[in-house]
Image (cartoon, rainbow, N blue to C red):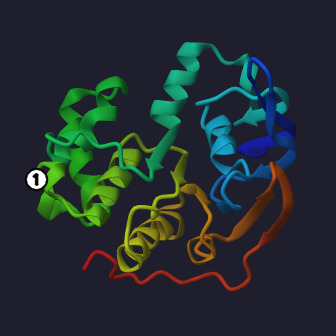
Amino acid sequence: MSLFEVEKLEKTFYGDEINTTVLKDVSFTIEAGEFVSIMGPSGSGKSTLLHILGFLSELTTGLYRFNGRRFEEHTDDEIARIRNIEMGFVFQSFNLLPRQTVFENVQLPLLYSGRPEQEWKKRVEEVVEIVGMSHRLGYETNKLSGGEKQRTAIARALVNEPKVIFADEPTGNLDSKTGQAVMQTLQRLHDELGHTVILITHETFTAEHADRMIYLVDGAIESDKPILNRRNANKDFTK
């Protein structure tokens, strides 16, 4: 059983005078432990597809199963639990609370996790160390660099030990050197810790950190193939 199963998926946005189909006849599977990049030009449907896979938006027609269950079989409470516990999200704009510390931002998903409160501090410290941010634990996030903000967002995505990490244009607001460090962080999470990673990007250099690329054009899959010359991570990415 695949972790993600998508078959003939379509997404249409309905307006008063015009309907816009942004995804059409999209079919693929993703196995647990894969690192997949979903790539394509602006307007190709990449982020819309991520939103459906992450239960942030509903599909119009077709089939989507996560971990063996169809999208429509889940209640609202189940979807909220999946998004908080089984999925972690990293966005281009970081989405951090600016006047809260790194610790407080990373801890936030634990408030709704059901994990005993006495375990929170240890878990936050663990994931902050994984992304190389232990030295900034008490800093307010508005005092961090862009790369430090994104690594904090990755730690927050990890804190509930999700099955999958979604990264939507995670390097879009960063310079090339900082973006490379963030991609090395994500690659290490996959290579060393076994996380399933789904990366949305329009950059070939960024996409090539994955093992496989799904390429979208005008809402349809143009190609789905392995990346033969995958970029290697520098293990000293936190320095």
Please give left or right for residue 53 compared with residue 181 in the image. right
Please give left or right for residue 197 compared with residue 62 in the image. left
Q: Residue 59's x, y, as percent?
A: 76, 29
Picture quadrant where residue 180 is located: bottom left
Q: Residue 41's x, y, as percent?
A: 69, 61
Picture quadrant where residue 200 is located: bottom right
Closer to us: 224 or 48: 48
Closer to us: 148 or 235: 148
The extreme left residue here reads: 138
How crowded pointer 1 is (Cα within 10 Å; few <14, some 14-19, many 20+) is rated as: some
Closer to us: 228 or 34: 228
Q: Residue 236's x, y, as percent?
A: 33, 82
Q: Up-down: is 77 above or below 57?
A: above
Q: Quadrant of the N terminus?
A: top right
Q: How many marks?
A: 1
Can you identify the residue that label 1 sits on? 139
Residue at image position (32%, 59%) is 151
Please give left or right for residue 110 compared with residue 76 in the image. left
Residue at image position (28%, 75%) is 238
Q: Residue 60's x, y, as percent?
A: 80, 26
Closer to us: 203 or 185: 203
Q: Quadrant of the C terminus?
A: bottom left
Instruction: Label 1, secondary structure: give it.
Output: loop
Q: Up-down: is 42 above or below 95?
A: below
Q: Up-down: is 156 above or below 113?
A: below
Residue at image position (73%, 43%) is 4
What's under tag 1, amino acid-wise? Tyr
Residue at image position (24%, 41%) is 105
The extreme front residue here reads: 17
Please give left or right for residue 223 compared with residue 37 in the image. right
